Image: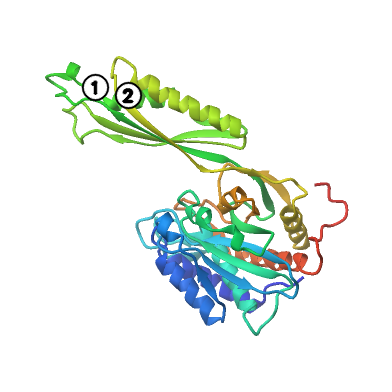
Amino acid sequence: MPRATALERARLSEEFAALCRIRSVSGEERAIADHVTELLTALGHEVDEDDSQAVTGAGSGNLLVRIPGSGPRYVLLCAHLDTVPHERDVEPVLDDGAWVSAGDTILGADNKAAVAILLALARRYAPGAEVPPVGLELLFTAAEEVALAGAKAFDCERLRASFGYVYDHATPIGEVVIASPTYHRIEARFHGRPAHAGIRPEDGRSAVLAAALAVSAMPFGRIDAETTANVGSVHGGVGGTNVVAEHCTVLAEARSLDDAKVEAVVARIVDACHDAANDPRCACDVDIDVQRLFSGFRHTGSAPSVRAAEAALRACGYTPTRIVTGGGSDANAFAAQGFECTNLANGTERNHEPGERVTVAALERMLDVTYALIDVLGPAEEPAVPAGDTA
């Protein structure tokens, strides 16, 4: 199996650190999209940026690079360019063999660890250099952290690949995500009546009280093994205490691997909001907006993308483990278009937290896994799967 060279390993860490220094919060992807485009163009690749930002509000469109292989098959490899919000600039530093942020910020390994790996592939398989045994479609999406907006706007009919991968799960290398949930976002806007809190409180209708009653009645946390719910934000009032609050907004979510279960939890959240608004202690109006932000997917163990990934992991010394997750990724958006895509754990840790980290070893090993995956997919009509697979 081909493996990363010493030069590729050194460049991988350098490129990863450089990517982390580029601010790319969702909606501000232009700088990193330009950086990636310049690198790819300098290597001789043609970069096709779509016009998705017109509908996503992202700072750039999605970037697609196609690299022909020695055979007719193609595989998609996808990474997202954006990060969750952070205030200070990121300064990556090495600490005991791991990349971390020097300040109180995220690192950006979600998902710049995967971006760096795709750029390493682009270098090895630049025009006029080595030809991969399978054609590669490298896709860099925008606005993934905003309910997968970039991937949703990408037209999978453009792809020549029949399946693909994202490396976007912050757990140990070897884990293969075979199921991901459907996700609903619920926004409830309570409208009450203002009044002086010390002189005429009985004339007021408190939107804050209505919101509090609603939240206290909502399902919360882990509902069962497949289902979760959360209230992420409550905001309203007037910034003082002497006015009965006229407005208050609650943002909640529900997720489940089972569509019927998530619909039931959403219904409970909506009912809690209506019941609170009708409570005589506050008697508010309420407007409720429910959005299905992405749909879930479930792979069978015999799915080509799963079997090929497991073969590559075994070739690199890992024992594959099939897992389900409560998180979403671009794989959900592609699955909704009927395109098979598998999310592979990439060894990053503590994503979306100031303590986010990734070891140099994890970066290098995922590059090795990627080269093994390319090799597995190249020579045969079907992905090579070791005998005795019991998928």
Look at mark 2 in the image and give the residue it sits on: 210
* Residue found farthest to the bottom: 128
342 to 158, vertically: above or below: above
Q: Nearer the viewer, residue 338 or 210?
A: 338
On screen, 314 above or below 226? Answer: below
Circle 1 SS class:
loop
Report whether 182 appears left or right of 321: left
- Residue ID for mark 1: 205
Q: Earlier in the sequence, mark 2 or mark 1?
A: 1
Disc 2 from disc 1: Cα separation: 9 Å
What is the three-letter code of the residue carrying label 2? Ala
Q: Which quadrant would residue 9 be assigned to in this image?
A: bottom right
- What's under tag 1, amino acid-wise? Arg
Residue at screen point 48% across, 48% down: 147
Give the farthest residue toward the left: 199
Q: Are the residues flagged by discs 2 and 1 in contact, CB closer than 8 Å?
A: yes
Disc 2 is placed on an element classified as helix
- For residue 37, say whether it is visible: yes
Estimate the x, y position of residue 210 in percent, counting from the top left.
32, 24
In this orientation, does residue 96 appear? no
